[in-house]
Image (tube, coloured by chain):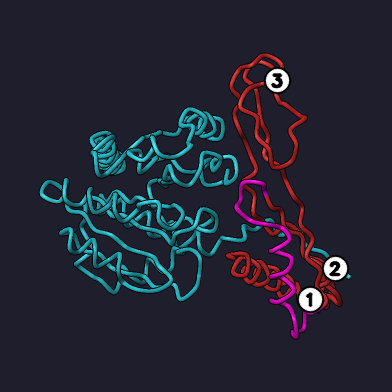
Chain colours: A red, B cyan
Amino acid sequence: MHEMGLAAEAYRIAREAADACSGGPLESVTIVVGELSAVEPDLLAFAWEAVVADGPDANARLVVDWRAARQVCAVCGEVPDRAAGSWMRLCPGCREPLAVTGGNELDVRNVVFAGATLETGGDG
Amino acid sequence: MSEIDVRQKVLAANALAAESLRSAFLLSRTLVVNMISSPGSGKTTLLETTARALRDRLRLGALDGDIATDRDAARLQRAGIPARQILTGGACHLDARQVEKALAEEGRRLSGLDILFIENVGNLICPTSYDLGEDFKVVLLSVVEGDDKPFKYPAIFARAAVTVITKADLLPHVEFDLDSVRQQVATLNPSGRFLVTSTPTGQGLSAWFALLEEERTRKQANLRAVCAR
């Protein structure tokens, strides 16, 4: 259950980003999670609720932007019709071995927060 | 309401610590191997055997991650190499800061090694995410665990540079389709190495030792390349 530590780290990053803009409470935080990042989105969402509970950002929503890994055939190109969580050894078209690419993402991508009081300047 | 695009890795803090470790390991010419598997796959047993075989030629050491007990570090010390237990107190993986702290506390005992083995907490999932500054990850899979594991736990098999099948002496007694496992690993990780081993019979061990020596030689060449720049 390493999702707890990851949720805490994601919260720290999001809060720091909002603080840098003198922002108020977080509304939502978008995290990109790749299929091969060894992270379970439901567990991450569950951990997120525990991390933000009882704090100033208790209403912050976690949005998981899930990215599947891709399977690519050297001959036919990408094989699009893989069922989620399943892996094909051979290309259904030409029976060549497939390679797996991508799916390693684990990034905080976007933070939405209330009440930015960032001074825009302009009169100086 | 305001919005900011962040694009920051969730594990950026761990990655920073890992890069600092990696840089120190480059200068000390220490090959670092992060060993990952389920509990009971034979990480410690393979390391005991490795320690006994290579300790006279190479300076070896180990960090052992576990939730409780210092049994693994004690076993490796009995096998003749310095080893330090890292107790995670419930956490399912090691992170780079725990490795930094343990190495700092050990001082000279675990410095200047030719090869440092980091035996991760027994778990096929969580340790996958955490870079420990290692040169490469090794995933172990014992034949009694079943032959569907690479596709069921694709992340670690995709990322480990080496897959070591252990307890191969038990193959006659279990249903384990070695060819299927080999193909699953090749699908996830076409450039990965695949070794089939048994510590009681010695099967595959010379290939494992050769791989370690080869990688250690490569690491030393890396430093020479850096210094020559």
Snapshot quadrant of residue B201: top left
Give residue A70's position: percent from left, percent from top: 68, 35
- Whether residue A56 sits left or right of residue B142 in the image: it is right
Label annotation for residue A92: 3
Q: Which residue is mark 2?
A: B2
**Spatial CA span between label 2 and label 3:** 47 Å
The answer to whether residue A32 is seen in the rendering is yes
Residue type at numbered disc 3: Pro
Specify the farthest residue to the right: B1
Gap between marks 3 and 1 measured at Cα: 51 Å
Chain letter for mark 3, please: A
What secondary structure is found at the residue carrying circle 3?
Answer: loop
**For the residues tagged 3 and 1, is the chain the same?**
yes
- Residue contact between numbered discs 3 and 1, judged by CB atoms under 8 Å: no
Residue located beneath label 1 in the image: A23
Q: Nearer the viewer, residue B70 or A121?
A: B70
- Residue interval drawn in magenta: A34-58
> Which secondary structure, mark 2?
strand
Residue B1 drawn at (x, y percent)? 89, 70
Vertical placement of A109 versus A4: above or below?
above
Task: Decide: is A112 above or below B220.
Answer: below
Q: Which residue sits at x=36%, y=72%?
A: B101
Q: Residue at x 77, y 60 (%)?
A: A30
x and y percentages locating residue A98 in the rendered image: 61, 25
Provide residue B114's location: percent of width, then percent of height. 22, 50
